[in-house]
Amino acid sequence: MTDLLQSASGFAVARGAQPLRVSHWKFNENKQMVRVYDTHPGADRSPDILVAPALIPVHPTTPVSLGPLERARELQPFADWLAERHVEGATIASTGCGAFVLASAGLLAGRAATTHWLMAEKFQANFPNVKLDVSRAVIEDGDILTAGGMMAWTDLGMRLIDRLLGPTIVVETAQFWLIDPAAREQRHYSTFSPRLSHGDAAILKVQHKLQVSPTRPVSVADMARMAKMEARTFLRRFKAATGLKPIEYVQQLRIGKAREVLQFTRRPVEQVAWEVGYDDAAAFRRLFLRLVGLTPSEYRRRFTAADAGAAKS
């Protein structure tokens, strides 16, 4: 991030603007926040924008002693310091699981925010008053900016450059760094991770059956019979366990399968739609766009495997 901002600063200076000041901070042995790096040492002005540490998430299958929530708790003094700077007028930002730090500081209460999509369930469970949206790479909510993971720090950096130096410097920096300045979204990259540790054995049984054959026609009545429940009870318990309505859950599974087929085959979109359970290709395209943020053709062009080749739709 420092390198990105300093590159932008250089382009701005070449056009007659003042350079950006970039500094790094940490707690010293006296539990005071001090600068440990500064492009303009000696200046006494407080930062206008502060970016919380990323707390890079670890994949759920990797054994770790501390997750982002525990690490955020260890950084509570830093979170409190951020909150104080925010009261003084500073803009606060985070990338990845740095949103846990902002939430611990109370800065995200009632506000829209994002974090790494793998940590969405844990984040929402601990900070239910935050309007979490992990489909987006960056959310700007006035004086609070949050970015998802992992490389979303580049998207955040470009947003900050736009705020500080304007769109011309954004384009020049993007060209120099080979970054696409157009907005990206986490949902272009994330995969559906269903909740399986909810403890409802009957619902889990249905989930396993859906996972085995996600493209087969299935109704709510069919799923209720699998769970041996009355339909209304099933709907209530399924939503409570998974966070989704049954039809939404099936859609996620089918679109996940469609993403695989689009990425690794040359099959036309119409055939892909039929393979994953949709007779209406137009309806499939609309659903794919809503859940993924790209059309099937755009997704294929962006993510096709090297040996799959391009396909038209």
Image (spheres, rainbow, N blue to C red):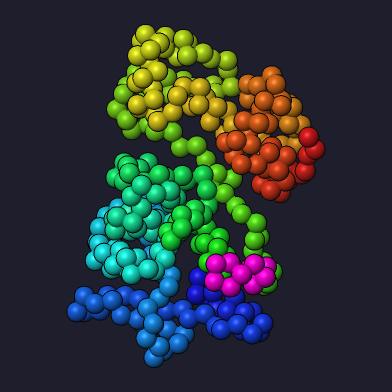
Vertical placement of 240 versus 100: above or below? above
Residue 68 lies left or right of residue 30; in this view the side is right
Q: Is residue 120 visible?
A: no
Position of 76 with respect to 273 (left or right) is left
Residue 133's x, y, as percent?
A: 46, 44
Q: Where 248 sits versus 40, above or below? A: above
Give the camera-side residue of 40 and 69.
40
- All told, the count of numbered labels is 0
Residue under the point 26% across and 64% down: 80
Hey, which residue is sitting farthest bottom in the picture?
42
Q: Identify the magenta region.
A: 162-171
Percent from the top left, x then y, of residue 299?
67, 42
Of the 4 image quadrants, the one containing the C terminus is top right
Residue at 63 percent across and 34 percent down: it is 288
In the displayed image of the protein, which residue is found farthest to the left?
30
Residue beneath the point at 37% across and 78% down: 46
Q: Main secondary structure of the magenta part?
A: helix
Query: Which residue is depicted at the point 30% across and 80% down?
Result: 34
Q: Is residue 178 visible?
A: yes
